[in-house]
Amino acid sequence: MHKILVVSDTHRKDENFYRVLEKEKDMDLILHCGDVEGSETQMQQLSPAIMRFVKGNNDFFGNLPDEIDFEMGGHKFFVTHGHRYLVNMGSSEIRREALARGADIVIYGHTHKPVTAEVDGIYVFNPGSLSYPRQEGRKPSYLVLTIDDDGKLSFEIKYLELF
């Protein structure tokens, strides 16, 4: 079984990320979908799991990749911040890119709004933002993905309570 924590758009306001690490245990991988703004080294040092980052439109410095592709639990992932795929207008462009890459899971950030969808065999996920949520209710959000030993995917958007 594989457990993956997905976060995005922390914008160097990292307190909620550390709150999530206290809540979510036994993660195999943590994905950050960009706009980390220089906090990646500290996050990686304090994380109990392996972290992978992609560069967001506000990540001007550092050496983060624009996109990553990998396989896990029988699924092929495509992870990007999303701003180059017009995600503010919907998911059609990013789904087209995922299909071209042979990915069945695409994960992105940028919009600060959580998304879980399955369209034409491609799972589309956005964890929302831990720092500046924009969806109704504006609660900081993140995503937990689980892949069981048979490759079955389960997922949940989770929210942090505001103080």
Image: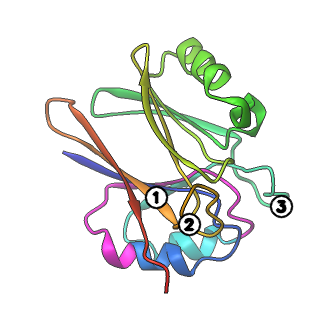
Q: In the image, is 9 to the left or to the right of 15? A: right
35 magenta-colored: yes
* Residue 142, disc: 1
Which residue lies most toward the right here? 60
Q: Amino acid at mark 1?
A: Tyr
Give the Cα separation between the discs numbered 1 and 3. Answer: 24 Å
Q: Residue furthest bottom?
A: 163
Secondary structure, mark 3, is: loop
Label 1: how many residues lie within 10 Å, few (<14), some (14-19) or many (20+)? many
Amino acid type at image mark 3 = Phe
Mark earlier in primary sequence (1, 2):
2
Q: Which residue is mark 3?
A: 61
Residue 161 image position (x, y, % from top left) = 43, 76
Residue type marked 2: Leu
Going 17% across and 39% down the picture, which residue do you hit? 148
Image point 80% across, 50% down: which residue?
A: 57
Q: Are marks 1 and 3 in contact (CB under 8 Å)?
A: no
Looking at the rendering, in which quadrant would you find the N terminus?
top left
Q: Which mark is residue 44?
A: none
In the displayed structure, 55 sits above or below 98; it is: below
User: What residue would you read off at disc 2?
Assistant: 130
User: What stretch of residues is rendered in magenta?
Assistant: 21-38
Q: Are marks 1 and 2 in contact (CB under 8 Å)?
A: yes
Residue 101: x and y in percent read 56, 17
Nearer the observer, 53 or 139: 139
- Tell me which label, 3 or 2, sits earlier in the chain: 3
